[in-house]
Amino acid sequence: MDKHLQSTLHEDRIFPPSDDFSARARIKSRKELDALRAKAEADHEGFWAGLARKELDWQTDFTQTLDESHAPHYQWFSDGKLNISYNCLDRHLAAHGDKTALIFEGEQGDTRHISYRELHREVCLFANGLKSLGVAAGDRVILYMPMTPEAVIAMQACARIGATHSVVFGGFSAESLKDRIENAGAKVVITADGGHRGGKVVALKAATDDALSRGCESLEKVVVLKRAGNAVTLQDDRDVWWHDLIEGQDETCEPLWVDAEHPLFLLYTSGSTGKPKGVQHASAGYLLNAITTMKWVFDIRHDDIFWCTADVGWITGHTYVAYGPLAVGATQIIYEGAPSVPDMGRFWKVCQDHKATIFYTAPTAIRALMKAGDDIPANYDLSSLRLLGSVGEPINPEAWMWYHRVIGGERCPIVDTWWQTETGAHMIAPIPGAVTTKPGSCTLPLPGIAIDIVDPDGQPISEPNQGGVLVIKKPWPSMIRTVWGDDQRYYDTYWGMFDGKYYVAGDNARRDEDGYYWIMGRIDDVLNISGHRLGTMEVESALVAHPQVAEAAVVGRPHAIKGESIFAFVVLKGERSADGIDEDLTRELRDWVAQQIGPIAKPDDIRYADNLPKTRSGKIMRRLLRTIAAGEEITQDTSTLENEAILQQLQGKT
Ligand code: WT7
């Protein structure tokens, strides 16, 4: 069997930054970038210590940069003290208090502009409200909220008083909410009557009541924001309206100075077992990398209007909505709803109306918007945009090219940012004024981030284009500190594979002859065809490059001779045949893949569907597809699926 993962994707298009863009950028050339990287390599700790003192306001300076004594629970700047909300709000007030911090647009079209001074006031009022409920430093507070400014206000208020927040995405069920409240031992839930999403009201308070009726011993209080105006019942001794809670509170709230390592938040990811996994982040290191990446990767400037479309329920909505943009004093857009309301032009309308300059979204959204056709974005003025970003999964070159051409007007660099909930901030990404991009590659590791690719024995793979396991070799400030309440799981999941030597991200990747990284897929998803090991990404990319294909997911299906054969699930741009079978097109697609990649990657089976099974964050659930491809009964928990109804179709039953 191949020791290395075989790579088959060939991509020769390159896009150097324009002179215009580079001239105005924070980092203007590859030379400047390489110098920064060399500085970090020469003195890893000194590099981060210098940035920590430059970018953060400390109440007490630190004397130790990196503490490895509890490795792999690394600690950064641990005897320093600061407050995260102070760093996001207070420090901007003197010079930029009247600058707009948030431009909010609700799904129904209501808008609000909130300045830094107003945001500071709202955060103080709410922080005092939380204190009046008995919330103190170290207490856990769950947020289960719509994507409105109050979600950011609540997160900042927790940070201000040292409470540890955990945001549960509003699309999750009562049962998932209950699991997370219990795992965190949370004292307070902050929710809303409802939020607008997809043209409907999501009944958040009702789901909260349902969750609490199932257990949640630790829970004392529920704060309810009035947002959608739907009917709710408040339990006298337990529930309080947001507006009643802040009524009469003091408009100032002294920030609580906490240790650099103080737990800022927990964020649950599903992991491979059912039990939710609470990724715990610390304070100073987390905010430091939120800031450095806002500056390096998004090249953020004072006059930018930044829009990251992620919900605060995901890490992207933490680092690039609730914390990063505020810490650098930027203006950002927050949109409450779905991209499809009232039609697939909504994102472009929001960009146009609020003059977005930087737009950051996920490949799954890009492909859905691309499927809707070029004439939709053509109706909007997108000339304010200067930079585009992508996050969450590998962006296939076809979607990249569409994004570049139709949305970016061939003018905007695209930053394809590789990172994870656990890394806290971008790890591999282009610096837009300095790095030539290649569609489908997240390009080069950021300064101070020690990425490598190793074989199953942990030996670095130096030959270009050989796929292997992506690892991070040195600790970095915004890294995960532990899995909440389960240090063993932290070790086993991220460090066990190479005995604690490297952080293991769980992805396979290759590095090309220019040192560019190409993510090939999750380690668990590798296809094993007649002894050749292939990543899912490249086969999917080849399929999506066909003019009729909008989306594709491939998995291995047990095969008597080959070990595994490739089973592809395909979503077409136009109509599909009713039974999900189309022999002519299947023949054409098989030949197409054979031509693009080689006969080895030819799917044996292709099934057509209207959609793919995705998690609420838009990731394809390949585990589920493997079960379907093998013709087995689905026994996995499917409640976290965005679209449960699609399962019948994928099984060929409709
Ligand atoms: C996994 C992390 C990072 C915030 C959102 C997802 C995949 C993420 C990319 C990218 C290729 C990517 C990886 C990673 N991923 N960004 N630019 N190119 N793959 O966070 O849910 O923690 O998922 O998403 O597989 O390990 P997450």
Image (spheres, grey):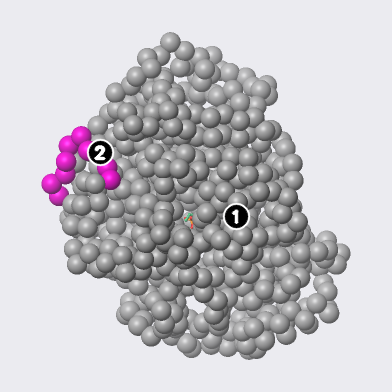
Q: Quadrant of residue 98?
A: top left
Instruction: Count up the numbered dots.
Output: 2
The residue where tag 1 is placed is: 618
In the rendered image, residue 388, in percent from the top left (x then y), is placed at: 53, 56
Neighbours of disc 1 within 10 Å: few (<14), some (14-19), many (20+): some
Q: Quadrant of residue 162?
A: top left
Residue at the (54%, 24%) spot, across then down: 224
Kind of residue at disc 2: Asp
Neighbours of disc 2 within 10 Å: few (<14), some (14-19), many (20+): some
Q: Is mark 1 within 8 Å of ligand 1?
A: no
Q: Are marks 1 and 2 in contact (CB under 8 Å)?
A: no
In the rendered image, residue 489, in percent from the top left (x then y), is placed at: 37, 56
Mark 1 or 2, which is nearer the eye? 2
Q: Which mark is residue 4?
A: none
Residue at the (27%, 42%) spot, across then down: 56
Kind of residue at disc 1: Gly
Q: Assign the C terminus to one quadrant of the image.
A: bottom right
Point out the stretch of residues depicted in magenta. 55-64
The residue where tag 2 is placed is: 57
Residue 241 visible within the image: yes
- In terms of sequence position, does the residue under pointer 1 or pointer 2 come before the other? 2
Q: Secondary structure under badge 1?
A: loop
In the rendered image, residue 295, in percent from the top left (x then y), is placed at: 38, 51
In the rendered image, residue 439, in percent from the top left (x then y), is placed at: 54, 70
Residue at the (45%, 82%) spot, across then down: 465
Question: Is 643 included in the stretch rendered in magenta?
Answer: no
Q: Main secondary structure of the magenta part?
A: loop
Question: Is 61 included in the stretch rendered in magenta?
Answer: yes
